[in-house]
Image (cartoon, grey):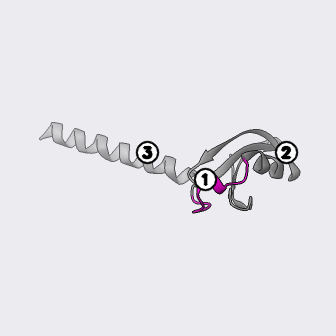
Amino acid sequence: MKVIRVIAVALTIGIGTGSAAVADGFKDCTKLDKASWKPASDAEAKAKALGYEVRRSKIEGSCYEVYGVKEGKLYELFYSPEDLSLKHTIAK
C-alpha cells in the first residue's frame, strides 16, 4: 500500500510540473499553414524596432517566440507568423 501511495505522489508532482511549464509559454498565434508564414527574421526586426536587443528566436507552437533584452530585462515576445502582430509578452 505504501508503494502505491509513493507512486501516486510522484505522478501527481510530475503532472503538476509539466503543466506549469506549459503555462509559461504562449503557443496559439495562427491556424495558417507554415508554408504561408512570413519569415521569422521579420518578427525579429519588429522586436528590434520596438527597442529590444534580440538574442534569439524560435517557433513555439504556432508562434514566433523572440527573446529580447530591453532596459536590462529579458522578455519573451510572441508574434503571429501570419501578420507579425505581437500576441503576448512575458517579462522574465
For the question of whether residue 74 can be seen, the reply is no
Q: Position of residue 23 (x, y in %)?
A: 52, 54
Q: Position of residue 68 (x, y in %)?
A: 76, 43
- Check if residue 81 falls in the magenta segment: no
The disc at residue 71 is: 2
Tell me the magenta residue range: 28-39
- Check if residue 29 falls in the magenta segment: yes
Name the residue rendered at 62%, 52% in the picture: 35
Judged by depth in the image, the label closer to the viewer, 3 or 1, is 1
Q: Position of residue 21 (x, y in %)?
A: 50, 46
Amino acid on which the number 2 mark rests in the picture: Glu
Amino acid on which the number 3 mark rests in the picture: Thr
Residue under circle 1?
Answer: 34
Q: Quadrant of the C terminus?
A: top right
Residue under circle 3?
Answer: 17
Q: Position of residue 91 (x, y in %)?
A: 70, 50
